[in-house]
Image (cartoon, rainbow, N blue to C red):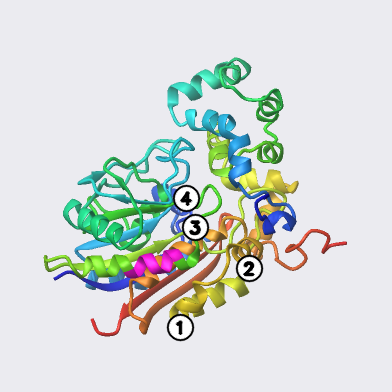
């Protein structure tokens, strides 16, 4: 029997569950490797060659090269692991969050200062019509 | 005998640690947040415990996807500050309490909670930001700390009720320890926030306020809230709040709310903070 996933209808949200974790294992372990300064240097020196050392799918490698975080998440990435990539790039959590929402960092920061994204209309897919 | 004197809940946003480490506390963005902890620091000076049992989560720092313990208790004598990718935070190493930690581990496992015992653990912002918020900048932390890591990275985290019942078992374990120790139990993480995907930035003040209210007056009922409610209402990372229930489970049914603070935003997150005291202490 398939797992019950009542969270599948939350818009703009991917829950890092057993299936995602299995898909993203190599991608996330690549991210973990970036916690070592020497690995960060090697990655920055030649991203493509460094990515080729990991048993990731070509799609996952392309998503990393493009810094497409939504794509990485769809392919099994977890935000706490992906954070090692934007930390390597010298970027903040707020930078990455803004990027994933498609907003400019200024607009995103302004939204947060005025109380954040409202749950109204954001609880279930299709609520916003 | 050891006794549980109080519980503290607080968010553990990494940007708060960075703001402290870079001396940005008096900037307009951060000032209101640190003001909310002024009372707490004074209270902590008067009520410094011997040991803090600190419930937190690791953020893909010491636990990668290789090993994912649902509940892990740190039994070492010392815990180094982790390098999370930009160098360790400039805060003192954490001194553990191996005797009490291993006493709790054995007691709680015998009470049907299957903990993972960890004798080597680098602690990340999930543990150090709460210490910094409550103690400020220090050359050494003023008490021992037992780190207790809960998996909230790979879904599902343990249920709210499991965390709450575990808190009760931890209290019984603490109170069966022979040494005369004052112990506080802290729960960290939350409140509403979502760090990923197009819905990032979600904040739900109504949910958070109700969570704070119910944690004080109706923890039994609150513990029954299913994960889907956290995810939908408080954001995908808001489910960290189950860790607060472990703290609450370690306290009396009736507690005094000594302090409450709520602030939006710290980076992407709603910050919540409570100090609760057992009435009999």
Relative side of A95 to B2, left or right: right
List x then y, in percent, for residue B198.
72, 50
Q: Nearer the viewer, mark 2 or mark 1?
A: 1
Q: CA distance from mark 2 to mark 1?
A: 20 Å
Range of magenta residues: B162-168
* Mark 2 / mark 4, whichever is N-terminal: 4
Q: Nearer the viewer, mark 1 or mark 3?
A: 1
Q: CA distance from mark 2 to mark 4?
A: 20 Å
What residue sits right under mark 4 in the picture?
B14
Quadrant where the C terminus of chain A sits is bottom right
Tally of numbered discs: 4
Q: Residue at x 58, y 40 (%)?
A: A21
Q: Can residue A17 be found in the magenta stretch? A: no
Q: Nearer the viewer, mark 4 or mark 3?
A: 4
What residue sits right under mark 1 in the picture?
B217
Q: Are marks 4 and 3 in contact (CB under 8 Å)?
A: no
């Amino acid at each position: 029997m398939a797992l019950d996933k009542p969270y599948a209808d939350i818009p703009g949200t991917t829950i890092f569950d057993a299936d995602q974790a299995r898909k993203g294992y190599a991608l996330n372990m690549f991210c973990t490797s970036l916690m070592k300064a020497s690995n960060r240097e090697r990655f920055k020196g030649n991203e493509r060659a460094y990515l080729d050392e990991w048993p990731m799918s070509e799609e996952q490698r392309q998503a990393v090269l493009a810094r497409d975080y939504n794509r990485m998440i769809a392919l099994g990435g977890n935000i706490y692991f992906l954070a090692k990539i934007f930390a390597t790039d010298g970027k903040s959590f707020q930078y990455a969050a803004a990027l994933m929402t498609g907003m400019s960092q200024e607009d995103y920061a302004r939204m947060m200062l005025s109380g954040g994204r409202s749950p109204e209309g954001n609880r279930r897919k299709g609520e916003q019509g | 005998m050891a006794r549980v004197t109080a519980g503290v809940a607080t968010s553990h946003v990494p940007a708060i640690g960075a703001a402290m480490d870079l001396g940005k506390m008096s900037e307009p963005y951060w000032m209101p947040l640190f003001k909310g902890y002024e009372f707490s620091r004074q209270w902590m000076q008067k009520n410094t415990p011997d040991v803090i049992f600190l419930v937190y989560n690791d953020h893909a720092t010491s636990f990668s996807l290789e090993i994912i313990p649902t509940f892990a208790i740190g039994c070492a004598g010392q815990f180094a500050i982790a390098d999370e990718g930009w160098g360790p935070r400039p805060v003192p190493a954490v001194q553990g309490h191996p005797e009490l930690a291993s006493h709790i581990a054995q007691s709680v496992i015998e009470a049907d909670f299957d903990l993972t015992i960890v004798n080597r653990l680098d602690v990340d912002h999930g543990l150090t930001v709460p210490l910094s918020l409550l103690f400020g900048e220090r050359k050494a932390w003023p008490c021992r700390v037992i780190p207790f890591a809960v998996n909230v990275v790979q879904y599902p985290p343990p249920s709210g009720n499991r965390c709450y019942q575990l808190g009760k078992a931890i209290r019984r374990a603490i109170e069966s320890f022979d040494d005369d120790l004052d112990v506080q139990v802290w729960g960290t993480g939350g409140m509403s926030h979502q760090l990923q995907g197009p819905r990032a930035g979600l904040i739900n003040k109504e949910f958070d306020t109700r969570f704070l209210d119910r944690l004080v007056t109706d923890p039994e009922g609150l513990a029954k809230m299913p994960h889907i409610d956290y995810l939908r209402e408080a954001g995908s990372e808001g489910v960290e709040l189950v860790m607060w229930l472990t703290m609450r489970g370690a306290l009396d049914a009736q507690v005094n709310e000594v302090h409450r603070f709520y602030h939006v935003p710290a980076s992407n997150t709603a910050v919540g903070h409570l100090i609760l005291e057992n009435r009999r202490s």
